[in-house]
Amino acid sequence: MVKKNRNVAIVGVGQTYHKRRRPDVTQVELVNEAVRAALKDAQLDIADIDVIVHGNMELFEGNYQGDMWHVDGDGAYMKSGIRITTGGTTGGTLVCATDNIVASGLYDVALCVGFEKMEEGEATGGITGMADPLWFRWMMSGALTGATFAERLEALTMEQLERLELVAAKLRVQLADNAVRNPYAHLRMKLTVDDVMNSRLLVYPLRLLHMCPESSGACALILASEEKAERITGKPVWIKDHVTTHLEDFVVGVITEAESTMRRCARKLYERNKITNPLKQIDTFELYDPNVWWHMDWMTEFLFLKPGENIEMVEKGVTALEGDFPINASGGVVSTNPIGATAMLRVAEAALQIRGDAGEHQIPKEVNTAMSSSFGGSTWSILHLLAKEKPK
């Protein structure tokens, strides 16, 4: 692992209940819900916080400099503050930046908060309007990326296609079952395989129930230096490492990298932390999964699986809550997606699993090490590695 000036731990976790719309609160009040929950979890007061790191997808809500607007909600008034926006990875970048500034010694206790209030903007318009739909169809986002799956499926037999569609449906049901146990999840639906396979077709093979929702909600984390963390809580979750990888030449239509950003990100994290078998050395994975097809693809990329191994893992229940390698015990992004907070929720849920505080969706085995991923535009990938044991 990379040697830090000092170890940093997550000492407070807070999130709101997530819904499609939250007309009962303003943006400031929504942010405040998550911040108050994190402070309560850490048994701290806002006076104990040295700096606020704030972020969301400004493009989707059509406003600018939300960090200045939200000072009454996040407690940043008369404190140091930083605003970050990196697309879908924003929540993950917030954790990276907050970890770095605490590890640097500049601040001892920091709060990061990400949010999205969907009814005040137009996320789909923001995504699909980022590129000309005629000249840049290859880089369109959202459900339209289903075309990339269709191209790869053309070479498969009908029997192979039927198996894949069934596995995708089984995976969605598995994630729905996890979300039902998570009181904060947006889509808490008891689904069947038939429900998924009969849901509306978007772009083959993507169906409506394969896809993530648009959620309104917020997440906040409090990070502290080693000395402070051990005073604040008896259950610190240590940020062992994080890696960021992105592919900027993607935007000019020339993808020169032979290795995906997911695989490169994982390779670097594993090499730095002497992980040779992630399925054995990591206890759970909170994967940023915008849809179940990418979930299956990215399992292979991040975990270095052999061809077809991802399919077998889902079929055998390996990735289920009670399985040998649970993935997205929280229900994942396909259940909850407040975009500016989505990647932070992956870190937050991984931390709760290590603490044993995930409630009904707590993994039944002991969780000592957890990994979470973030994903955003320019095929931007982030991995966080969390641990119960303090790094040496």
Image (tube, rainbow, N blue to C red):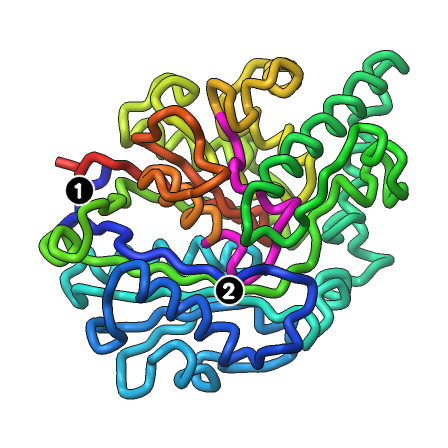
Kind of residue sitting beneath label 2:
Ala
For label 2, the SS is: strand
> Crowdedness of circle 1 by 10 Å Cα count: few (<14), some, many (20+)?
few
Residue linked to disc 2: 218
Q: Quadrant of the C terminus?
A: top left
For label 1, the SS is: loop
Main SS category, magenta section: loop
Residue 329 on the magenta span? yes
x, y percent for residue 204: 86, 36
Above/below status of 241 relative to 231:
above
Q: Nearer the viewer, residue 96 or 74?
A: 74
Residue 341 on the magenta span? yes
Query: In which image quadrant can residue 146 be found?
Result: top right
In magenta, the rendered stretch is 326-344
Q: Nearer the viewer, residue 186 or 61?
A: 186
Kind of residue sitting beneath label 1:
Lys
Q: Nearer the viewer, residue 152 or 170?
A: 170
Rendered residue at 36%/59% (across/down): 221
Can residue 5 be seen?
A: no
Residue 3, which numbered label? 1
Query: Which of the two labelled residues, at mark 1 and mark 2, occupies the earlier sequence position?
Result: 1
Rendered residue at 59%/51% (across/down): 185
User: Mark 1, mark 2: which one is toward the viewer?
Assistant: 2
Asked if residue 70 lies left or right of residue 334, the reply is left
Which residue, as the protein is rendered here, is positioned at the far front? 360
Asked if residue 260 lies left or right of residue 290, the reply is left
Q: Quadrant of the N terminus?
A: top left
